[in-house]
Amino acid sequence: MAALPLAGIRVLDLSNFLAAPMAAMFLADFGAEVVKIEQPGSGDEMRLWGNNKNGVGLYFKVINRNKKSVTLDLRTPFGRDAALRLARESDLVLENYRPGTLEKWGLGYDALSAGNPALVLVRVSGFGQTGPNSHRPGFGTLAEAYAGFAHINGEAKGPPLLPGFGLADSTTGLMAAFLAMVALKGREANGGRGQVVDLAIYETLFTLLGPQVINFDQLGLVQQRDGSRLPFTAPRNTYRTRDKRWVSMAGSAQSIFVRVLAALEVPQLVEDPRFADNRARLVNAIALDVELQKAFERFDLDEIMRRFEAAGAAVAPVNDIAQILADPHVLARGDVTTLEDAELGGPLRMQNVAGKLSATPGTVRWAGPRVGEHNREILIGRLGLDAAAVRAAGIDLPS
């Protein structure tokens, strides 16, 4: 196996739940050694999130893959001191507590970096470390509303809708991993010193929501809910086929729109002045969707896919997870990986590392570990702590 590009980077993951742990997952996928700190006994509360098999939380297995689990109570002198010792030999610390919490425990950046000035601390919180809302509790669901996503998501006459997965947390995880790498690289321009990264959960989603700021600033426009339509291109929607399947389609370029009409055997629509170009189609998007829906429901999904491929037009089936896991393209790309997991007693599948590096690809080496599975390796083997003292602190030492 090729060398992993982040091998040698040590990450201390003090975070829990989703956003910051996902950032640590991305780093671990490419070889960073991630030591995840969990509460003794119960562990990260994410172990209780969502579905479980025989009491084992399944989503935890994904988000905390490739990590080592160590249990410490950071509110105690023993836990604080052990965390400080781990920070001294780490490149990066990730945390997502409410602002001021680490400082209350004696684990602020000054303390964490006292013996390691090259340390980078990535702080993820609902509203950031500064500003009038910084003291407020915050998590992904609130961020999806606060950043403006829920306002534009849903049908025009319906209520604002939240996403069906942790959108704000997941996008924050991506951004936190990116900023962590920027800050690590930034040590070269900062005399070898580390720094603090302050990321609010709502900020990444706010950035990704398109041209809303400039449209409002320059034109006074406020984007409203409009189902699956977009305010800058038409057509763009989902359409039902004759066999009651659904497809997703967008005619973002004029050439694509013409090919779509040819595939659906309605080329005359391009001659309709209402649909002549993208700006005309935006004005008449509802009428266009009515015509396209009539055309789509004349064909079964398989025939739609054949026709669009032959015409060089773009379309995709609306897949559920069972269909994705059986899709030949997904399988050929290696987008799903299979692992053996002792805790679950057999193989499990999860999403593979996203993106293909030609020389140093990432890899999923193991699923999320048992609570405290690596206590002995890290606390005794690396830090040299006394086993009796570890046990006296209420920490198990698996053999």
Image (cartoon, grey):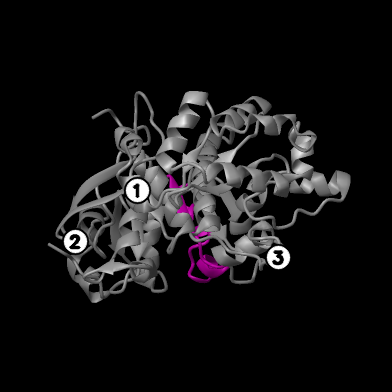
Judge whether residue 54 is colored magenta: no
Q: Residue at x 34, y 65 (%)?
A: 38
Q: Residues within 10 Å of mark 3 (few under 14, many from 20)?
A: few
- Please state if 345 lies on the left or on the right of 312 as rendered: left
Q: Earlier in the sequence, mark 2 or mark 3?
A: 3
Q: Which mark is residue 157?
A: 3
Residues drawn in magenta: 89-116
Label 3 – label 1 distance at C-alpha: 31 Å
Quickly name the residue at label 1. 323
Quickly name the residue at label 2. 344
**Secondary structure beneath label 2:** loop
Q: Earlier in the sequence, mark 2 or mark 1?
A: 1
Q: Residue at x 23, y 30 (%)?
A: 1
Relative vertical location of residue 2 with respect to residue 78 in this rendering, above or below: above
Label 2 – label 1 distance at C-alpha: 24 Å
The quadrant in which residue 159 appears is: bottom right
Q: Earlier in the sequence, mark 3 or mark 1?
A: 3
**Secondary structure beneath label 3:** loop
